Image: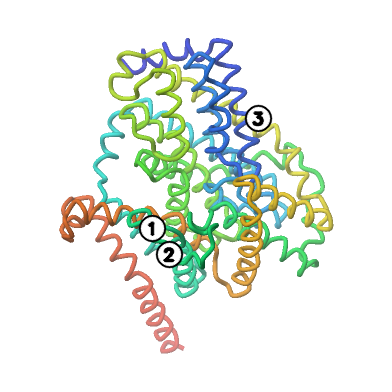
Amino acid sequence: MENLELLWQGFKVALTLPNLVSALFGAILGLIVGAVPGIGSLAGVALLLPLTFRMNPTTAIIALAALYYSNMYGGAFSAILLNIPGDSPAVMTALDGYPLVRQGKAGLALSTSIISSFIGGTIGIIILTVSGPLLARWGLKFGPGELTLLILFAMTSIGWLLGENPTTGLVATGMGLMFATIGVDMTLGHSRFDFGSVNLLSGLPFIPLVIGMFGFSQVIDMVINRHKYVAVGIHEVSMKNIMMTREELREITPPSIRHGILGTIVGVMPGAGATAASFLSYIIEKRINKNRDMIGKGSIAGMAAAESSNNGAAMGAFAPLLTLGIPGGGTTAVLLGGLMMWGLRPGPLLFRENPDFVWGLISSMYIGNIICLIIAFASIRFMVKVVKVPASVMVPLISVICVVGTYTVNNSLFDVYLMILMGILGYFMRLAGIPAAPLLLTFVLTPMLEGYVRQAFDISRGSLSIFVGSGIAKVLLVLTVIFCLSPVVVGIMQKRKGNHGEAVA
């Protein structure tokens, strides 16, 4: 009851004209930043932060927070329409969104992403409102040992859950591991696999890798296989095409709810973030959905899982930030720096000493999420016209987006050359049937895994007991073993079923 009273007071703060305008401005800017490949919420918040120093702290943080969570909406647009994820959490959205566009269902794909994003975001805000401090304390129970096992669990499952078969999935996972170990070891300071290039000392940059694998490889495919891109089959997108049927809503609601909850929990964990939440939810949905064979080929359930999860994670990241002063990722780290510059110290006392600020921010998220929903739907009919552009125009247009989006991150031509190389590699991987998603997930998780393993051994002085020292660790170990054995068990069962069928015949 106390939380509801404080939330009501927060709405009085959030509904003032300056704060409403701030939420609207942040939401619009976040959608644009998310839709443009290569920028992302971290760069967007970092660029906007200096402009907010003269604002009221509450008004400023409302704008920055709106930019952050609306970025999750915007990242889906380019992922779906152009197969170029606007930000790393949208990588999984592209796996089902772009096939839907090729099937002439761009309106359905965009509607699915927007509605599931809204559901996931709303769930995240509700959980943050009711149990933010509790979630933050639970997230802190994941020490280096538990986080190591969590990442290992993800890696052991992605190889065959995201691949057409265990072999190609594990090959992609191995490639991701190799790419992630390029550069200087942050613990020991030794350079690894940099081939004498100064540009590789800081590691293989993620943006050129993502844009190359998903965007430029698509350009190569459009040039080589022109006949596949003659027409998409979309002429006009009316409100009837955009609005989902009752059956479609029923299909996306359960995954949106369960992965909105899961994404929020993952978002609470320091260092996990929306990208890890999106990947993990997609993996789980591919395992449990009754139409799992369709996921990756144009499934709205797969899109709903990824989009609701990354929006839930974006909201969940505010729980440890506000209650304990622990950022869950790069973007929230920038927000933490802004709070300190405004003279605010995040932590348990923040709720007591600055209730107007905290509850005004939380209340603004409800309003901002509704603003994102309205703006995103209003822009569908404009955005979907992208797929009607002929391939002869799309090829140079996407190429320019790929080059500019890559170059603007570090103002480096090396990144552009690397993006082109990754595009060529991505095209040959496609020909060989090797999926890009396990590679990207492993690439994201490997540096985290390496850091957590080192921390775990430092704490335990080299003892393996830290990996079985808690109930969470034991559960994760059991799940990892089950997932490792699953392909073998499934193969044996299928072989027995086939032999039984032959015997009956």
Q: Secondary structure under badge 2? A: strand
Of the two numbered discs 3 and 1 on the same chain, state the one appearing first in sequence: 1
Quickly name the residue at label 3: 375
Along the line of sight, the residue nearer the viewer: 102 or 74: 74
Q: Secondary structure under badge 1? A: loop
Q: In this view, does 208 lie to the left or right of 488?
A: right
Quickly name the residue at label 2: 192
Q: Residue at x 30, y 15 (%)?
A: 352
Of the two numbered discs 2 and 1 on the same chain, state the one appearing first in sequence: 1
Q: 10 Å neighbourhood of mark 3: few (<14), some, or many (≥20)?
A: some
* Residue 340 in the image, given as x and y percentages of width and height: 40, 23
Q: Which numbered dot is residue 170?
A: none
Quickly name the residue at label 1: 185
Q: In this view, does 424 lie to the left or right of 435?
A: right
**Does residue 291 show up?**
no
Q: 10 Å neighbourhood of mark 1: few (<14), some, or many (≥20)?
A: some
Say whether marks 2 and 1 touch (CB < 8 Å).
yes
**Which amino acid does the dot numbered 1 rest on?**
Asp
Q: Which residue is drawn at 43% across and 28% down?
A: 337
Q: Secondary structure under badge 3? A: helix
Q: Residue at x 65, y 57 (%)?
A: 99
* Residue 403 in the image, given as x and y percentages of width and height: 70, 52
Q: In this view, does 128 lie above or below 437?
A: above
Of the two numbered discs 3 and 2 on the same chain, state the one appearing first in sequence: 2
